[in-house]
């Protein structure tokens, strides 16, 4: 009995491991249907024997896939009466090749010396078991002409419609790692490269100053995309602002907070909500005055409500001879002109 | 007067460059137009996006992004009040060889280490064969529809030099005025380098001149194995919020401690269809150190990643921000052939704050279910329903929808 239980458990374990291996992609289905390019290469069959006329192909025109008639010229006794391409070669890779024909300005005729047949130089994947034989970008850039096009961002020289291709440029423009953090640096250094694919829409979604167009809402059908204001950002936005206020002000005006809170009635300006500051926040000299330290630790929080016209509230106490005393920290130094520049003039009337 | 003459000469040279470039390059390029409508109920807001491009000579791209809202108190719209606002209305003209391009209108300008700007104006780029790029920009900064100081104008430039095939070094500057006074004046340096196939690094640094001090510095260095199974990254950033304020603000004279963040992350392709990412960082805010981090796993349900499942655990403990979050999301391909596909995207997140009380609630759940149809002819339809609870609302339900269409055609060869 124990042996039966142990055997059953072992079989279940093996079955689960097998299922897991398939799920994780560790074990591939043999019947996946990749075309056996490698076997043909090893047999010494020239590519032109099946892809007849490919060397003369220009930028447009038909694809040069072999037909069943081409196959049976060698495979005289086929094991199945169906069309060979139904099983040999993946439909999605054939579709990818058709898309490349549609989206790329590419002429085999100008790339191949007549009769040379040296296809593997670019289509390296034919030597593996894969039938995805599209040429990698670095292979193109190894040629002097295309290097020059890359330098001047002349993507249109080859790519008829780069955004329409919908291909992620993994091989030459890295979007790995925490790209949300890195995209600024990359866009700063090579913004013109970004605009080869991306339009202003992507920039405006975060950096538009006037109204919110949160990317996680615009692209609500792309949950895998990492964005700054993911999912239920509303519930943690106050905590995020406390943790890194500068991250907010990179895109939003400091008055963005009070603007929204006032409209929603979630602010000190709503009488029913009362004073947003705790007891002991401000008072005459000698009493509890927590606001000074808080303002030095996070002046942006103060500015978010009291910025603009609200600054006059500070100046009513913090002025020469006023009860608030000197608001500057020790060692304060500024190149602003007391007489002329606005923040100074609020207190230093006449440059005093 | 001499300066004006120099500007006029420069402009004339640019136009000449555009006009003299050869016509043959773009002969087979397509024209395209596209439109997208996006809308949300409660608050009632929407976007109209119109894009068009032509690849005849010269390349022209035009786009408009118009935001609209109606009856949404959040945006100050009571009753039946409605409003529209242009976020982007711009035209970009580029010569096919990439020697020069120019953008005019209302747009987001991101260039060099200085901060991104939303402006009504122009941006001109010239590229020399020596991989030296020159950029100039200017205009009027776009202001939010809120009380505050309005800007008068902005102008700036960037010069960058390509470092062989492996990198770029650039320097940038801008100057912004309001009420006749210098509001911001920032200078910055940006740098990116791919020293080897396994090593890349990038950094940017910006300095505020009016109220001298560091505005922002950000640096990353990362390394990956050649098979891209592992990728590790070290990063650090420092930002001083008051350097981002208009320097005519009284709050800039207080000085500030800024926020510093430094940490590392590691990506591991644990199996061909399974990616794991872990990140941890120390963060200083309001003179206190804290930490933040997350662990994320993505399992693709097919070799091409058309379907996938994501799980994420996140923790933040910085200053007053203390919470734990769990997020689950998935993309499920319900139907697919070579012409069209239908996908279902469920997403769920729960945030558990450390400070729990009856007023704010003990946990803030959020969920969304989206359905999308795409056709190769350029049509796409998507709709979603969303529900959440947060500090201020026990139950918040809303609907989202999007329709988009893009058409392409080729002109005469």
Image: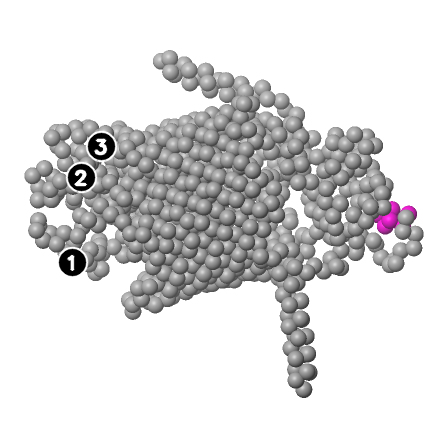
Which element is circle 3 on?
A: loop
Spatial distance from mark 2 to mark 3, Cα to Cα?
12 Å
Image coordinates for residue A292, horizontal then vertical, percent: 17, 48
- Of the numbered discs 3 and 1, the one sitting upstream in the chain is 1
**Does the rendering let one see residue B49?**
no
- Of the numbered discs 1 and 2, the one sitting upstream in the chain is 1
Q: Chain of mark 3?
A: A
Is A306 left or right of B201, judged from the image as shown? left
From the viewer's side, name the closer residue of A196 and A37: A37
* Residue B255 shown in magenta: no
Image disc number at residue A279 = 1
In the picture, which quadrant includes the N terminus of chain A?
Answer: bottom right
**Does the rendering let one see residue A337?**
yes
How many tags in the picture?
A: 3
Image coordinates for residue A319, horizontal then vertical, percent: 11, 39
Report which quarter residue A324 is drawn in: top left
Report which quarter residue A328 is drawn in: top left
Residue at 66 percent of width and 25 percent of height: B24
Task: Report the magenta residues as a range.
Answer: A67-73
Spatial distance from mark 3 to mark 1, Cα to Cα?
33 Å
- Residue on which the image places disc 2: A330
Dot 2, how many residues are within 10 Å of its Cα: few (below 14), some (14-19), or many (20+)? few
Disc number lying in front (1 or 2) = 2
Dot 3, how many residues are within 10 Å of its Cα: few (below 14), some (14-19), or many (20+)? few
Image disc number at residue A334 = 3
* Residue A70 shown in magenta: yes
From the viewer's side, name the closer residue of B145 and B292: B292
Say if B232 sits above or below B135 in the image. Answer: below
CB atoms of marks 1 and 2 within 8 Å? no
Which element is circle 2 on?
A: loop
CB atoms of marks 2 and 3 within 8 Å? no
């Amino acid at each position: 009995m124990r042996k039966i239980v142990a055997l059953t458990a072992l079989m279940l374990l093996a079955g689960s491991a097998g299922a897991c291996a398939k799920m994780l992609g560790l074990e591939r289905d043999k019947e996946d249907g990749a075309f056996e390019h490698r076997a043909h290469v090893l047999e010494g069959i020239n590519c032109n024997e099946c892809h007849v006329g490919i060397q003369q192909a220009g930028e447009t025109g038909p694809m040069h896939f072999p037909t069943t008639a081409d196959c049976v010229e060698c495979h005289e006794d086929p094991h199945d009466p169906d069309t060979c391409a139904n099983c040999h070669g993946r439909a999605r890779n054939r579709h990818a090749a058709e898309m490349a024909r549609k989206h790329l300005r590419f002429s085999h005729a100008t790339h191949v010396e007549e009769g040379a047949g040296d296809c593997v130089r670019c289509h390296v994947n034919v030597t593996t078991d894969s039938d995805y034989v599209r040429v990698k970008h670095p292979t193109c850039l190894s040629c002097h002409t295309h290097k020059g096009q890359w330098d001047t961002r002349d993507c249109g020289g080859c790519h008829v419609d780069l955004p329409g291709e919908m291909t992620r440029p993994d091989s030459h423009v890295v979007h790995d790692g925490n790209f949300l953090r890195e995209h600024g640096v990359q866009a700063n250094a090579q913004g013109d490269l970004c605009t080869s694919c991306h339009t202003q829409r992507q920039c405006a979604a975060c950096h538009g100053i006037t109204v919110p167009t949160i990317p996680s809402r615009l692209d609500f059908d792309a949950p895998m995309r990492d964005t700054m204001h993911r999912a239920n950002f509303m519930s943690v936005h106050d905590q995020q602002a406390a943790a890194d206020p500068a991250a907010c002000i990179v895109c939003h005006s400091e008055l963005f907070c009070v603007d929204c809170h006032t409209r929603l009635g979630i602010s000190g300006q709503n009488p029913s909500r009362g004073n947003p500051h705790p007891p002991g926040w401000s008072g005459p000299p000698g009493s509890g005055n927590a606001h000074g330290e808080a303002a030095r630790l996070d002046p942006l929080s103060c500015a978010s409500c009291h910025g603009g016209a609200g600054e006059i509230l500070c100046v009513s106490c913090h002025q020469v001879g006023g009860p608030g005393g000197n608001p500057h920290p020790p060692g304060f130094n500024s190149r602003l002109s007391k007489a002329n520049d606005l923040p100074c003039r609020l207190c230093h009337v006449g440059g005093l | 007067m001499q300066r004006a003459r120099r500007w006029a000469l420069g402009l004339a040279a640019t136009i000449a460059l555009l006009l003299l470039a050869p016509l043959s390059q773009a002969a087979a390029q397509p024209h395209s137009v596209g439109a997208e409508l996006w809308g949300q109920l409660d608050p009632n807001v929407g976007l109209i996006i119109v894009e068009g491009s032509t690849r005849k000579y010269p390349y022209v791209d035009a786009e408009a992004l118009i935001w609209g809202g109606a009856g949404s108190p959040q945006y100050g719209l009571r009753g039946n009040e409605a409003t529209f606002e242009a976020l982007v209305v711009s035209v970009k003209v580029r010569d096919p060889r990439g020697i020069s391009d120019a953008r005019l209108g209302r747009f987001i300008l991101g260039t060099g280490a200085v901060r991104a700007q939303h402006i009504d104006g122009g941006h001109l780029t010239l590229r020399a064969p020596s991989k030296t790029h020159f950029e100039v920009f200017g205009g009027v900064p776009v202001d939010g529809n809120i009380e505050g100081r309005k800007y008068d104008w902005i102008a700036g430039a960037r010069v960058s030099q390509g470092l062989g095939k492996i990198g770029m070094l650039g320097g940038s500057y801008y100057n912004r005025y309001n009420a006749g006074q210098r509001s911001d004046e920032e200078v910055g340096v940006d740098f990116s380098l791919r020293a080897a196939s396994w090593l890349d690094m990038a950094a940017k640094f910006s300095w505020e001149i009016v109220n001298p001090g560091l505005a922002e510095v950000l640096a990353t260095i990362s390394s990956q194995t050649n098979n891209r199974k592992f990728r590790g990254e070290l990063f650090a950033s420092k930002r001083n919020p008051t350097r981002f304020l208009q320097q005519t603000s009284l709050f800039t004279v207080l000085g500030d401690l800024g926020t510093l963040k430094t940490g590392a992350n590691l990506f591991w392709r644990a199996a061909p269809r399974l990616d794991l990412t872990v990140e941890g960082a120390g963060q200083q805010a309001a003179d206190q150190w804290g930490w933040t981090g997350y662990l994320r796993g993505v399992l693709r349900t097919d070799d091409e990643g058309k379907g996938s499942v994501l799980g994420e655990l996140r923790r933040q403990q910085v200053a007053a921000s203390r919470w734990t979050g769990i997020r689950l999301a998935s993309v499920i391909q319900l139907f697919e052939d070579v012409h069209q596909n239908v996908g279902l995207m469920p997403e769920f997140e729960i945030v558990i704050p450390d400070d729990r009380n009856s007023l704010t609630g003990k946990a803030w759940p959020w969920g969304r279910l989206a359905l999308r149809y795409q056709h190769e002819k350029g049509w796409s339809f998507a709709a979603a329903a969303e529900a959440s609870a947060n500090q201020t609302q026990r139950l918040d339900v809303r609907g989202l929808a999007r329709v988009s269409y893009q058409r392409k055609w080729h002109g005469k060869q």
